[in-house]
Image: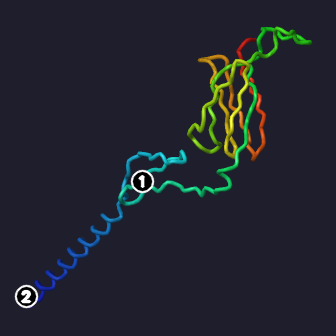
Amino acid sequence: MGNKIIIIILLVLVALAGGFYFYNKKVEQKRPIACNMEAKLCPDGSTVGRTGPNCEFALCPTTEIKEEATTKTGTISGTITTSPTCPVERIPPEPGCAPRPYATSIEIKQIGKTFILKTIKSDDLGKFNTELPLGSYELKPAGGSVFPSCGSTTVQVESGQNSVVDISCDTGIR
């Protein structure tokens, strides 16, 4: 009878040890994996991070490029001016205080994208003109280190159309 009790106790201990082993093995598998915060820059300008159990980069989004859309273009043109040019503007305006043309570079980004698609320059009369594929764009003229301060402007380019954009930069004169 003493041997039977020892055998039963040993079987219970083996069963407990086996249960403990398999429980810990399942707990180890459920531990979350932490991936570093690196980002991959995709061709369309978006970024993707690392995911999954192997911390691999996610796939970049794909966009279908229709042959028809890539061949059609439109143009944008316009003038960049700076104003005010006098500390006090009067009514009627004085001819010497009219907005002045501003020669600068203009960065063009497609709306929703992070990269600069094209950089163009306005001439000495502040005029610019460029051809672009169809879509919505943000135009950002380069201002000075403080003034003139130029804000962004959005424009829609349509097939075969010329979109006119006039941009005014603030000189800071008050």
Which is in the foreground here, disc 1 or disc 2?
1
Check disc 1 and report the residue beneath it. Answer: 57
Residue 36: horizontal and vertical position, in percent?
38, 47
Residue lying at the far right in this picture: please name it. 92
Left or right position of 94 against 168? right
Left or right position of 67 against 38? right
The amino acid marked with disc number 1 is Phe
At a point 32% along the width and 65% down the height, the residue shown is 29
Which of the pair 77/146 is nearer the observer? 77
Quarter of the picture containing the C terminus is: top right
Residue 149: horizontal and vertical position, in percent?
67, 21
- Neighbour tally class for label 2: few under 14, some 14-19, many 20 plus, Cα within 10 Å: few
Tally of numbered tags: 2
Left or right position of 42 against 18? right
As measured in the structure, the alpha-carbon distance from the residue carrying label 1 to the one carrying label 2 is 61 Å
Check disc 2 and report the residue beneath it. Answer: 3
Which of the pair 64/143 is nearer the observer? 64
- Quick one: SS at disc 2? helix
Residue 53 figure quarter: bottom left
